[in-house]
Image (cartoon, rainbow, N blue to C red):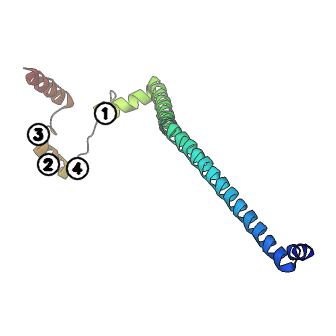
């Protein structure tokens, strides 16, 4: 038996046993790694599914939010323009409350003159010819043109 015990503890036998044990450990670690990999792959797939679901669920509300923010900005711009227009109209109303401004505008637009003044209208001859050919009303007083406009609109209604 001493020989058998010697064989069992011989270097070749020990190396062979060591190789078998190492091979068994390598095989076990590979199986564990594969099992771990498959679990990671399942987890990764679940994580990807959750992320995709969140993206799909949040896409429409985010799009609506962006659209509404753009609409709010547009409405604020329109509001600012309306406020500026109101301010301009208030200024114009205040100017018309001034008698000197109203008199000036009336004199310019209606060619009125004060008693004792002599009114002159300087007309560009080329513009007068063009106006006569276009409208035929350049040499008539303004009230005649207004009355013709009333007649034309009355005739259009019939």
Q: Earlier in the sequence, mark 3 or mark 1?
A: 1
Quarter of the image where the C terminus is located: top left
Measured as percent of width and height from the top left, residue 123 is found at 23, 46
- Res 118 → quadrant: top left
10 Å crowding of disc 3: few (<14), some (14-19), many (20+) = few
The numbered disc on residue 136 is 3
| Left or right, 26 with reference to 120 | right
Looking at the image, the residue that sits furthest to the front is: 1
Q: Along the polypeptide, which appears first: circle 4 or circle 2?
A: 4
Position of the N terminus by quadrant = bottom right
Residue to which mark 4 is pinned = 124
Pinpoint residue 20: horizontal percent, then vertical percent.
75, 69
Element type at marker 2?
helix
Query: Could you give the CA–CA distance between mark 4 and mark 3, rounded to whole angstroms?
Result: 16 Å
Q: Is residue 29 something that shows in the picture?
A: yes
Residue at the image position 49 percent from the left and 31 percent from the top: 79
Q: Position of residue 133 (x, y in %)?
A: 10, 45
Q: Is residue 117 visible?
A: no
The nearer-to-camera label among 4 and 3 is 3
Give the CA distance from mark 3 to mark 2.
9 Å
Circles 3 and 2: CB distance less than 8 Å? Answer: no
Q: Residue at x 46, y 32 (%)?
A: 85
Looking at the picture, how far across and down is residue 140, in whole percent?
15, 34
Q: Residue at x 32, y 31 (%)?
A: 113
Q: In terms of sequence position, does the residue under pointer 3 or pointer 2 come before the other?
A: 2
Residue tagged 1 = 109
């Amino acid at each position: 038996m001493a020989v058998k015990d010697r064989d069992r503890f011989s270097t070749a036998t020990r190396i062979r046993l060591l190789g078998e044990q190492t091979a068994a450990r390598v095989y076990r670690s590979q199986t564990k790694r594969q099992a771990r990999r498959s679990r990671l792959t399942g987890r990764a797939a679940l994580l990807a599914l959750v992320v995709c679901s969140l993206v799909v669920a949040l896409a429409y509300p985010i799009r609506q939010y962006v659209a509404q923010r753009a609409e709010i900005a547009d409405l604020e711009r329109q509001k600012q323009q309306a406020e500026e227009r109101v301010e301009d109209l208030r200024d114009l109303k205040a100017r018309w409350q001034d008698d000197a401004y109203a008199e000036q505008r009336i004199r310019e637009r209606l060619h009125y003159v004060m008693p004792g003044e002599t009114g002159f209208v300087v007309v560009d001859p080329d513009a007068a010819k063009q106006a006569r050919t276009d409208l035929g009303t350049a040499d008539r007083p303004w009230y005649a043109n207004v009355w013709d406009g009333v007649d034309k609109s009355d005739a259009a209604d019939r």
